[in-house]
Image (cartoon, rainbow, N blue to C red):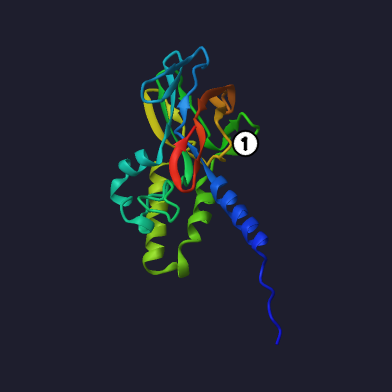
Amino acid sequence: MFRVPMPSRAVTVVSGLTLALIWGCSYHYVAGPLQPTGSQGASMTVADDGGITFTQGRLEVRLRPLTADELNRQFSSVSAEGQKSTNPYTYGDTEFADGLAHTRFTVFQLSVKNYEHPKVIIDPAKVELLAANSRQYWTLNLQQLDTYYRGYAIGYRGNEYSRYQNRMDLLRRTMFNADPVFSGQETEGFLIFPALHADVNSVELVIHDAALRFDFRDEPVDQIDISYAFEREIGKANWRQPQQQM
């Protein structure tokens, strides 16, 4: 009769040590929230809530990063059903098997107050995040997010389809759009980026080609780039010890 050879005691000991080392060295990255860096442009003002405001005359363009907890509180009515939560910016209060807090997207609130120009246009499609380690992220538009959430609408009927529609409705109402901000108007909305990679500890958000003046053909003749600098603390935590180890 054929017999499977049993591993020797030495092999067993070595295998056990290897597994112990792998288990002991297993870790995951953890990252704190984005915060303004100490160095900003001359036209920038940093507020206590983490927002940064660009000011030119009576034009203000304010940007503030939002955490998943903030977004869950802001949309609390659609963030408290675990995996059935329809907050499109987060995973709601879903508890994951690994016990970690998962980030669905990187979200900023953009606010514009125009009391300076006849009209101002900021196109969210021209906003990017540049990481210090050369990673690059562009804003996600409504069509991309629609494609992302359609994957959850199994069969396009019933409760799953209803949740898909609710997510898209909230995105349409709250995302920043490229509509003109006329003189005397104020507007705000969210900019959505993919979740940052674990190795990203600082980013520069750049609004490209913010249009401030237009000619008789309604073509922009005065455009500027506006840059905001943020950083976050990154560390490692053991899988068995989820607390942060900086």
The residue type indicated by label 1 comes to Gln
In x, y percent, where is residue 81? 32, 56
Query: Is 99 on the left or on the right of 14, as rendered?
Result: left
The answer, for residue 161, to whether it is visible in the render is yes
Residue at position x 32%, y 51% in the image: 78
Q: Is residue 162 above or below residue 169?
A: below
Residue at position x 51%, y 27% in the image: 231
**Residue lying at the far front of the rendered structure:** 9
Mark 1 Cα within 10 Å, few/some/many (few <14, many 20+)? few
Q: Pick whichever, 160 or 121, lies toward us.
A: 160
**Residue lying at the far bottom of the rendered structure:** 1
Q: Pick whichever, 83 or 23, lies toward us.
A: 23
Residue at position x 56%, y 38% in the image: 125
Q: Quadrant of residue 224?
A: top right
Label 1 SS: strand
In x, y percent, where is residue 105? 48, 44
Query: Is 57 on the left or on the right of 225, as rendered?
Result: left
Residue at which label 1 appears: 136
In x, y percent, where is residue 20? 56, 52
All told, the count of numbered labels is: 1
**Residue lying at the far left of the rendered structure:** 77
The answer, for residue 176, to whether it is visible in the render is no
Q: Quadrant of residue 1?
A: bottom right
Q: Pick whichever, 229 or 187, lies toward us.
A: 229
Q: Is residue 93 above or below residue 187?
A: below
Query: Is 78 on the left or on the right of 56, as rendered?
Result: left
Q: Is residue 63 above or below residue 145?
A: above
**Residue lying at the far right of the rendered structure:** 2
Residue at position x 32%, y 41% in the image: 74
In x, y percent, where is residue 88? 41, 49
